[in-house]
Image (cartoon, grey):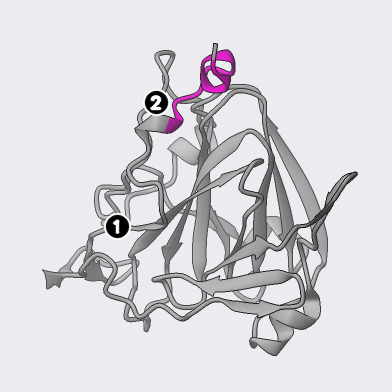
């Protein structure tokens, strides 16, 4: 029996195995109208990977969002790899502050958390990595002046690929677990501020995010995350 079967996962049903940028019409975050022309999938200019020391930074199709890959150095014992390098992030002009680190453990495949962000003056940068299991990680650009405003990106993060997603200020973030017993590690630039916490609903029709198919038992979502209002409301 394969790992996905043992863990109740559904990795094969991902919308895309590579970073995936969703189609949607541009518009104001708090307004009902949308521009007439939809943004094109993958239209944002990608930058080449930057290897600084032992982390590899690759900017995605959403400017400011980076994938951080490790560069393992193997020997007979296994391997050693750096997973975070503040100097490398700072050299690229990224926010290298670390205020809090947290983990989230998810019992079931199909658990969906998000989409979360903090409003100014407590806007935060996040580094997100899956340390056990696998997730489909999603970010949404909520910067009103951005050329990719309200476009989304989906990336598979797993314990095997050891990737980290760098999520800057001005983005909402969420994920769906792909297997049972999945653990996610977060590193935040500022402390959690409950009065500034906000979110977008995972199935908002204006975002039209292509989440992986849920398992037979359906998704597991908190009442709070189900209650975020529509962007058009």
Tell me residue 30's x, y (percent).
33, 66
Along the polypeptide, which appears first: circle 1 or circle 2?
1
State yes or no: discs 1 and 2 in contact (Cβ < 8 Å). no
Judge left or right: residue 125 versus residue 40: right
Q: Quadrant of residue 108?
A: top right
Q: Quadrant of the N terminus?
A: top right
- Per the image, the residue denoted by label 2 is 214
Tell me residue 173's x, y (percent).
52, 55
- Whether residue 169 is visible, yes or no, is no
Give me the residue at 37% from left, 60% from top: 152
Which disc, if any, is residue 22?
A: 1
Which disc, if any, is residue 154?
A: none
Circle 1 SS class = loop
Judge left or right: residue 16 versus residue 109: left
Tell me residue 52's x, y (percent).
71, 80
Give me the residue at 65% from left, 55% from top: 128
Judge left or right: residue 179 versus residue 184: left
Cα separation between marks 1 and 2: 19 Å
Q: Nearer the viewer, residue 62 or 198?
A: 62
Q: Nearer the viewer, residue 147 or 159?
A: 159
User: Could you classify mark 1 by the number of other residues whose Cα lies within 10 Å: few (under 14), some (14-19), or many (20 or more)?
Assistant: some
The answer to whether 172 is drawn above or below residue 130 in the figure is below
The answer to whether 28 is drawn above or below residue 13 in the figure is below
Circle 2 SS class = loop
User: Could you classify mark 2 by the number of other residues whose Cα lies within 10 Å: few (under 14), some (14-19), or many (20 or more)?
Assistant: some
Residue sitting farthest toward the right: 77
Magenta segment:
2-11
Is 143 within the magenta?
A: no
């Amino acid at each position: 029996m394969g790992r996905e079967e043992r863990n109740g996962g559904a990795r094969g049903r991902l919308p895309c195995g590579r970073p995936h940028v969703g189609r949607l019409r541009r518009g104001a975050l708090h307004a009902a109208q949308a521009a007439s022309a939809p943004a094109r999938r993958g239209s944002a200019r990608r930058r080449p990977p930057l290897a600084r020391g032992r982390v590899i930074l690759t900017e995605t199709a959403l400017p400011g969002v980076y994938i951080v890959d490790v560069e393992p150095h193997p020997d007979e014992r296994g391997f050693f790899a750096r997973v975070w390098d503040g100097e490398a992030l700072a050299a690229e002009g990224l926010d290298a502050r670390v205020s809090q680190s947290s983990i989230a453990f998810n019992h079931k495949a199909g658990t969906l958390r998000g989409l979360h962000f903090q409003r100014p003056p407590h806007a935060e940068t996040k580094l997100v990595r899956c340390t056990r299991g696998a997730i489909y990680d999603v970010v949404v650009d909520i910067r009103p002046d951005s050329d990719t405003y309200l476009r989304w990106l989906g990336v598979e993060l797993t314990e095997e690929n050891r990737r980290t997603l760098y999520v800057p200020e001005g983005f909402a973030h969420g994920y769906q677990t792909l297997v049972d017993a999945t653990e996610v590690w977060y590193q935040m630039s500022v402390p959690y501020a409950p009065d500034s916490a906000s979110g977008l609903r995972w199935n908002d029709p204006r975002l039209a995010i292509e989440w992986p198919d849920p398992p037979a038992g359906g998704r597991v979502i908190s009442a709070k995350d189900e209650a975020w209002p529509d962007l058009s409301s």
